[in-house]
Structures are given as C-alpha cells and as structure tokens.
Amino acid sequence: MAEELKKGLDGVLVAESALSDIDGDEGRLVYRGYDIEDLARGATYEEVLYLLWHGRLPDREELDAFGDAMAGERTIDEEVMRTVRALAEADANPMAALRTAVSMLPAYDPAPDDIESTDREVTFAKGRRVTAKMPTIVAAFTRVRQGDDPVEPREDLDHAANFLYMLNGTEPDDVAADVFDQALVLHADHGLNASTFAALVTASTLSDVHSAVTSAVGTLKGPLHGGANQDVMEMLKEVDDADMDPLEWVETALKEGRRVAGFGHRVYNVKDPRAKILGERSRELGEAAGSIKWYEMSTAIEEYMADQKGLAPNVDFYSASTYYQMGIPVDIYTPIFAMSRVGGWVAHMSEYIEDNRLIRPRARYVGPRDLEFVPVDER
Amino acid sequence: MAEELKKGLDGVLVAESALSDIDGDEGRLVYRGYDIEDLARGATYEEVLYLLWHGRLPDREELDAFGDAMAGERTIDEEVMRTVRALAEADANPMAALRTAVSMLPAYDPAPDDIESTDREVTFAKGRRVTAKMPTIVAAFTRVRQGDDPVEPREDLDHAANFLYMLNGTEPDDVAADVFDQALVLHADHGLNASTFAALVTASTLSDVHSAVTSAVGTLKGPLHGGANQDVMEMLKEVDDADMDPLEWVETALKEGRRVAGFGHRVYNVKDPRAKILGERSRELGEAAGSIKWYEMSTAIEEYMADQKGLAPNVDFYSASTYYQMGIPVDIYTPIFAMSRVGGWVAHMSEYIEDNRLIRPRARYVGPRDLEFVPVDER
C-alpha cells in the first residue's frame, strides 16, 4: 500500500477546536484566546473551568453561582468511599484508584449514563460533578493509606483550598492555596494530548462522560504523559540523596542512557510557558521556607540540558518541586494533574460530540495471508 | 492552515499490524492469516486467544496448558466482588460496572502496575488474568442484580461453557456452549475499531494493561460501537410487541428518521462475514426451540435494508437474536462483546508498544486570538 503510516499521529489534525492553542516556537499557550500567564495570575480554577466550558469568562455573579454549585457536589457516595478505602488498604497505585472511583461514580449520579450523551447541558453537569468529586477521592485515598480518616469537604472553601484542607485536615495558608490554584489553572487544558484524545475516542462512540474521563485518567497515568511529574521529583530526590553536583549527576545519567524526566515535549520547541510560572512559584516557596535548594537544583539541570541537549523544561519539571515544597506526597502529583485536566477533557469531549464522527483509524496489515486451518489434534 | 482535517481518522493508517485483516469489499475477515469462518467452525476461543497473542495456533499440549492457566485465574478478589455487588444493587449500567471492576483488578494483581509495561510476557500474563476474570464479573453482576448469589467459576469447563454456567447456575448443553464459544471467536478482534484504538492511545503513554482495557470497555459501551447489539434486540422486541409486519415497522422507523440498528459499518461495504455465521446459528437455535420468528424477522429486515438502503447487516445484527434465544439478558450483550474483544485489545496493545510512539494528534485552533484579560470584578 502506498498510503503513509501516521504512527503517533504527529501533526495529524483530527478536530477543530476553540479551546486551547499552542505556539510551540514562541512558547505560548492560550485558552480561548487568553494568554495562560494572564489566566494563571488573574483567574481561579473555577473561572477557567467556566471559560473552557461556556466559552467566555464569567462575571462575578456567574462565577459565584458556578463555584457554589460545584462546591455543593464534592461529597462522594458511601459505596464509592468504601471502594476508595479498600484500594488504599490494598496499596493500589493512586491513579488506578482514581480511575476506579471515577468509573464507579455514575452508578450514583442523578443523570442516567445510558443515553446518547450529546446534550451539552447534561455533559457539563456531569463534568462539573466529576470535577467536584475527584479531589475528594484523591484526598481520601491519600489519608486512608497513611492511616488517617478522610476529611469531609467544606463548601465554604474554593476548589484548590478545599483540596489542601481535605488532604491535610487543616486549612491552607493563602500562599499555598494560591500556588495550588495556579497549578490547577496551568494544567487545565493543552490541546489534544494523549489523555484528552483518549477521552475523545471514547466519547466518539457516544458512550458517556464518566467513560471518557475514566479513559483519560488511565491514559494520563503513563510515564510518557502525566506520570512524568512524579518521575521528576524522584530524580531530584535521587540527586539530593546522592549528595552529588546536579550537573555531574545528570551527565552520568545521560551517559548511562537514562531519560532525564521533565524535558522535551511533542509540541514545544522552546521553554513551556507553564514551566516559567511554576519555576517562579517553586522559588518563592523555597524562599518562604528558608531554602531554595530544590529550585537551584532544578535551574542547574535546566541550564545543563539546554546547553548539552538543546532541550527545554516542560510543565512537569517545575510542578514537581512546587508540590514537594507544599508537602504533597510524590505519588499523588499525577492524580493532581488529573484533577485539573478533567476540565479540558470535559470541554474537548463536549466540543467534539457536537459534530461527532466515530474515531476509527486503520492499521496496515503486515501479517500472513491465506493460511490453511488445521484442527488442533492434527497439528 | 492548509493541512487536511482527518476527523474520525477514516482510512488513516496509525500502525502496522499482523493481527487481523478486513477486506471490506469481499466481506472477508482474517486473524493472522486464517479465515474467520475456519476459526469460528474449528477453533475454540482459547485457541484464538493463543493465536492472537502468540502468533500461531497452539498444538494440543500448548492449548491445554494455556486453557488450564486461564481457568485457574477466574476467581476475583473479595473486595472486587464487594464492589460488583454494590454496583448491581445500585442498578449500575452493566458496562459501567464491568469498566469499574476491571479497573479495580490490578490492586489485587500479582504483578505491579506501576512499571513501564513494555515486557510482552508481563502484558500477556496480565491480559490472560483480566480475560479470565471478566466473565466472572459479568455473571456475578447479572445474578446479584436479579437477587441471586454469584456462582463460583469451575476450572473443569472451557471459557465459554464456564461463563454460561456462572450466569445460569447450571451447566449449558453442548449446543449452547458451542454457539457461545463461536460468538466469542467471531468478536475477538477486528482491526483498529474505536475500543481497540482507545486501548492503544492509553497504552502508548506506557500506562498499563488494566488502564488500556478499562479505556476500551468504556469506549465499547457507546451505541455507535458495542452498544449496538443491545439496540438491535430492543428493536426486534419493539417490532414483535407492535405486532406489525417487520417491513412496515422498518419503513415507518426510517420515515421518522430513526436509526435501524445493526446495519452499515465503517469498514464493510458488503455483508459482514460474522453476521453470516451468527445468522445460521440464530436459525438453528430457533429451530431447536420450535420457532424461528426472530430469525425470520431479522432476515426480512435484512432484505428490506439491502433493497431500500443498500446496507448490509453487521455482526451486531445476528448476535442479538442468537443471545436472546439463549436466554441472556439484553443489557449484557455488550459486556459479552467486551469479554471477547479483550483478546484483541491485549494483542494490539502488546504489538503497538513493542515499537511504541506516543499517540498525540493535534486540533486546528479555530477560537479567538489575543483577548485582553480583565479581572472578574471589572467585567
């Protein structure tokens, strides 16, 4: 066959989208026309969700109504909590636990999931509920695993602050709440990355919102996607434990053929704009705590990789030390990524199914032909 | 941008594969070079799994060892069973229940799921376990929902016969076991359909087998994919209840703009070879029961659709009346499809990650540009 193989679908356009635009040469990311830096510095996660789902920034009244509705939907059904507890006690992978709990939610969702889900309002209401509940799942899983009881969500806190409250059992200070909210804004959408694309493939059969989000969580789990932020922190800790100069460590790692996590991106040729903002916050958190060692280690590695490999850091590279300095367990960095990106998953699936086309590519057959079947006992 | 939009990825080649080949003009389907008719008539589901995963048909000794290993892995952990019971009691959608239980399995799987799963043997061992356990989940869910206790799997029965035994609590007769086994063989693989492609997208991040199978189950759930076999039976029952001539019913339905389930396929331009074989079995089951009304109704609709619309039936069209005459509840037809197709999902993901490339397409941005951000209280 003369047709070209598009393995990985690099550069293949599978949809039109008004959600996010990435300029990989300029290092620019916009959500619906707004620069990511402006949104990260000026808008909350709830505001960005509203923007992504409804196409424009809300006014104060709309934002408050949206935030209140979501805050009222944070509690998870006791059977889902029972399963989350079982998974924590079995020491399940945190992303596997999140995937399972998200998949279980629709059994207790007020809207049926066995309809053709092409109604925007149903999609967004389900999307809002799953977005509201994911932090409750992640926090409960983390606490049960360390021997603590889950903390009930509080309706008077924002999405970001409430998560930190449920995780730690104490209200976060303003800086922590602000940095975490900003991290959620920065991760909310990013074009047709693998997890978002998985959500589209699932939604394109007119399955349902929870199926699509479940596919996306399982896809984000992989080390070539969301799993990378955890890998970055494990690397930084390894450098720290080895008590080596970071440059020496990286040089040795590269010689040994190891992958240095947090560098390079299919889409960016320059520094990821999200890494720039998170880098600043990582530094601030270090300064507030009296030591910027993680930040300094990170920038040293960044410079080395730029000089030696021509690679720039991606969003995972600075989210790692940011979360670490906030005392968040390393293996829930990827669930936190999911808690944010669910906004983009729901936005993209809703947009795609408005003018749906089942996603069904082909493979080039390279196997044998015309084999004669012989029954098993004659083989 | 001048680049072409490939919505739905129709005809786009995303991988090379030696697994299955479809000739849509000839109505031919082969698995690794063997015609689907030969396999359906001469091989068991276990034999076909071995073929798909290991690249050749097993001899008697290999087949017995493979079947015994799988039969020994049918039991599910009691916490998974506890969640399946909760979902049955909550009257969850059966595919949502299967998706959740499959997602929960790795917490109790002997091999870790947080490794880069590029080892074929690990993939196939995990694949074999999830394939062994899916019928246990589906049967338990169905029984609990109808107020019965789950039936423990039996190691001395084949995969197909054991499922019918767990579902009904009695051993199936030879005809039922044979027809069901044949249905599993016919559904085991079919190129890069949407659910298989969802599994590839998930696996391409080097996530893990259970994540990929979970994505695939949620994708198969949609009415434009696996959900169609259930829709066919609901249509046939509606025709029967209306006490109308099937042709008259279809004519009215088409005039009202309704979709007639079980016709047309992205890949076949002629009759799906699987529909031919299942049509024969549907007739035989009717004859054995003393009434071929479902078969006759189906063939009448088939002829009408061919004449009036130029559309041929797909696999879902005859699996519907086949399963119905076996007494299987209509809403577990799609879970049964999943119980079979998992063989293809595992085969394709293993093949793809051997020479992996992250699947990450792009969207053409059609949204606004350069909007000025105004803080919420100034909007």
Image (cartoon, coloured by chain):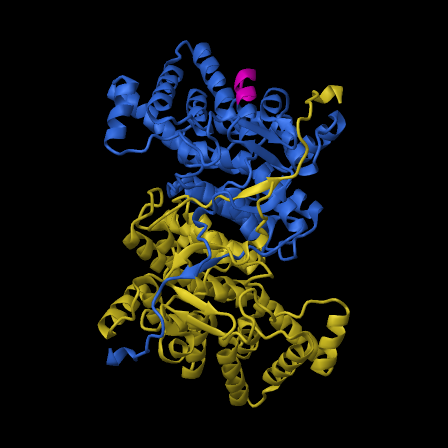
Chain colours: A yellow, B blue
Q: Is residue A11 left or right of residue B289?
A: right
Residue A376: image location, x then y, percent: 71, 22
Picture coordinates of residue A159, whole percent (x, y): 37, 70
Residue depicted at x 51% and y 29% = B25
Does B208 lie within the magenta span?
no
Q: Quadrant of the N terminus of chain A?
A: top right
Q: How many marks?
A: 0
Is residue B147 at least partly visible in the picture?
A: no
**Residue drawn at 44 percent across, 33 percent down:** B265
**Which of B150/A287 is in front?**
A287
Q: Is B175 within the magenta?
A: yes
Q: Is residue A294 visible?
A: yes
Residue B21 found in image quarter: top right
Above or below, A363 against A285 in this view is above
Q: Is residue A93 above or below residue A251?
A: above
- Region in magenta: B172-179
Question: Residue A58: horizontal and vertical position, in percent?
Answer: 27, 71
Q: Nearer the viewer, residue B202 or B143?
A: B202
Residue B293 percent coordinates (x, y)? 36, 14
Q: Is residue B28 left or right of residue B234?
A: right
Label the magenta part by its dominant secondary structure: helix
Residue B316, compared with residue A43, is above or below; it is: above
Identify the image quadrant of the C terminus of chain A: top right
